[in-house]
Image (cartoon, rainbow, N blue to C red):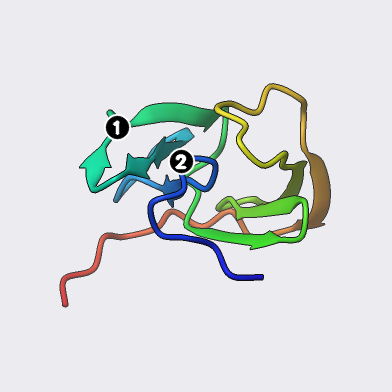
Amino acid sequence: MEIPADDPAWPIFLSPHGPAERVATSRTFKGQSAPKSVFLSDLDSPFGMALIGSDLYIANTDALMRFHYTVGATVITEPGVKIADLPGLLLEPTVT
């Protein structure tokens, strides 16, 4: 499936650098960016994301979670499903 870069139904998912409890989104339309908004909260320092079909996978420091994603959604409020436990290590920022 090809997704147009300026289709507002498909957001860019953003996870802040360092400890955080949320994933934000930013949408563009005709070259104009919309303000960032909180898309998913109550997370544990998310550091990895993958959108596969209608499932959004989030790697927290302590667990891999799966959330149902609907195209065009601006927020996820349903609880996720824990797929696997992760070590829960404190992530140190890296400089590259």
Report the amino acid beneath label 2: Pro
Q: Position of residue 78 (x, y in %)?
A: 76, 25
Report which residue position mark 2 lands on: 8
Label 1: how many residues lie within 10 Å, few (<14), some (14-19) or many (20+)? Answer: few
User: Going 76% across and 60% down the picture, which residue do you hit?
Assistant: 53
Q: Position of residue 50 (x, y in %)?
A: 61, 62
Q: Position of residue 67 (x, y in %)?
A: 74, 42
Residues 15 and 87: in front is 15
Badge count? 2
User: Going 40% across and 47% down the picture, which residue do you hit?
Assistant: 15
Apparent side of residue 75 relative to residue 45 in the rendered image (left or right): right
- Say which label, 1 or 2, has the lower sequence index: 2
| Residue 93, placed above or below residue 13 | below
Helix, strand, or loop for circle 2?
A: loop
In the picture, which quadrant includes the N terminus?
bottom right
Q: Are marks 1 and 2 in contact (CB under 8 Å)?
A: yes
Report which residue position mark 1 lands on: 34
Helix, strand, or loop for circle 1?
A: loop
Report the amino acid beneath label 1: Ala
Outermost residue, front side: 30
- Residue 13's tag is none
Residues 1 and 74: in front is 1
| Residue 83, placed above or below residue 22 | below
| Residue 70, placed above or below residue 91 | above
Outermost residue, top side: 77
